[in-house]
Amino acid sequence: MAYRRTGKVSARLADNRRRILNSAREIVAEGGFSAAQMSEVARRAGVATGTLYRYFPSKEDLCRQVFREVSTREMNILANIASEDAPAMERLESVLRTFAGRAIQGRRLAYALLAEPVDVGLSEDRTRFRRTHAQVFAGILDDAIEAGDIPPINTQIAAACIAGAIPTALIGPLAPESHEIEDQSGARVLDDIVAFCMAAVHAAPGTAAQKNEKTEERRIAS
Amino acid sequence: MAYRRTGKVSARLADNRRRILNSAREIVAEGGFSAAQMSEVARRAGVATGTLYRYFPSKEDLCRQVFREVSTREMNILANIASEDAPAMERLESVLRTFAGRAIQGRRLAYALLAEPVDVGLSEDRTRFRRTHAQVFAGILDDAIEAGDIPPINTQIAAACIAGAIPTALIGPLAPESHEIEDQSGARVLDDIVAFCMAAVHAAPGTAAQKNEKTEERRIAS
DNA sequence: CCCGAACCTGAACCATGGTTCATTCCCTCC
DNA sequence: GGAGGGAATGAACCATGGTTCAGGTTCGGG
């Protein structure tokens, strides 16, 4: 009697699952995890609340799934830059600039990933995310020291500082208001932040400055 | 008939109010604002839940009061250092060290003040706190530039970066575990963080290093 | 000593939002 | 085409935690 799951059905199931995840992601990107209520996710995905529980055992699981998808994407972008075949200092600056640039566009998503109030389950994932994150910075810094580009420093601490400085300056309460960033001054803010971090690791002066005029070409794809 | 509030009574009222505030503060210092449930505050203060509402119109008001008391205290400490009659770079380092040092002891309180999930009412106060905070840094940096101690930089951005870097490196998920900090290595971590920030603003090298041996004497009073 | 006002108490109330489950719908198979 | 099982529904359920309020207690004034 057992009935075989036909192609059309499992396609629909997969589609539902995807649509739920996408809806959740959209909501998070617009209003953070606090806006991601199950009823709202369901509404946007065009299914009933109860249906969510056929695809995810709990809200926490759904949110973690969303978090992982988004953060993995971000991580990969940075990791790719870090593993490029280029001098450490170039990779460092590129990573910083990309990180900050992506946070500026999609500030709400960056906020959700990095700073928003979340409960314990998610903050476990976030911890992993930020650590991995800092590891990318630390790795490049180690390379730079190895290559003699910068003097020896505590790369773990420096990486943590960078990982804190950039989001704070961009998306926290200390950040300039959105409208200040939207327009042309955004590039300037970005340059200043990158310059701060480069100086912090004793990058040879000028390295960051030269790049200023390149900012325009370096627009990051969303 | 009008009944005059006698001294003994208003003393008791004041005492109650104080005890409530103190209990709330203790709880926040131990477990953050999330642990500060009204029933728990009442229990610790030795009054009934309803009584809290004779002293504070809502939980939010109570929490904001606590936040203000604690943050004002912290702010004053930093502001005093900032307004000392000393060279800008000395004041800068002193402020950084004090800030980081106080965050290290009382990490949970620092977490509550700086990073913990809170709802909108409180985060308004927190925003003010962090801004004032960053202003202290920025003011000193301006002095330093004026005095020619460091090259001109965007002090607003630098201040925001510093205000983000220090807590992240100390109390966030990127921070070393408590036990790593409790023991002798705490001073080392602190030195590295301060060194990072000093370098970031192009402080002349060595300034931070000289101070390392002074760390012991600079133990911050709680 | 008694009255009324102020104060205190804590159990009941309520709002929010995640989770469940009896019912309905739709699909596969015979 | 209809029997039976998986999938979907959404209103009801429940847990949490802030807030209220009817009833009891304490205090000042006469």
Image (cartoon, coloured by chain):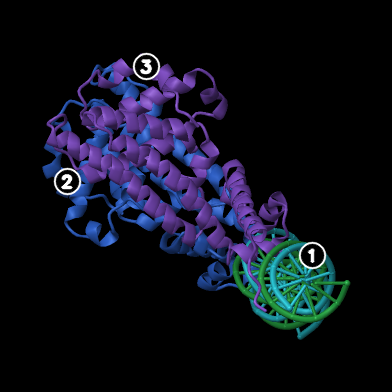
Chain colours: A purple, B blue, C cyan, D green
Q: CA distance from mark 3 to mark 1?
A: 81 Å
Mark 1 chain? B
State the residue at coordinates (73%, 60%).
A48
**B185 sits left or right of A22 in the view:** left
- Residue B82 horizontal/vertical position (percent): 33, 33
Q: Amino acid at mark 3?
A: Lys
Is any atom of residue B86 visible in this view?
no
Question: How many numbered badges does the structure rendering display?
Answer: 3
Numbered disc 1: secondary structure: loop
* Image coordinates for residue A125, horizontal then vertical, percent: 43, 56
Most extreme residue toward the top is A213
Label 3 to label 2: alpha-carbon separation: 42 Å
Q: Earlier in the sequence, mark 2 or mark 1?
A: 1
- Is B163 in front, or is B50? B163
Q: Are marks 3 and 1 in contact (CB under 8 Å)?
A: no
- Which mark is drawn over residue A214? 3
Res A98 → quadrant: top left
Residue B215 is labelled as: 2
Q: Is residue A168 above or below residue A64?
A: above
Q: Quadrant of residue C5?
A: bottom right
Between B198 and B106, the residue placed more toward the observer is B198
Q: Single out the mark in the foreground, 3 or 2.
A: 3
Which is more foreground, mark 2 or mark 1?
2
Residue A166 visible in image: yes
The quadrant of the picture occupied by the C terminus of chain B is bottom left
Give the side of residue B22 with respect to residue A92, left or right: right
Q: Amino acid at mark 1?
A: Met
Chain to which the residue tagged by mark 2 belongs: B
- At 24% from the left and 46% from the top, the residue drawn is A156
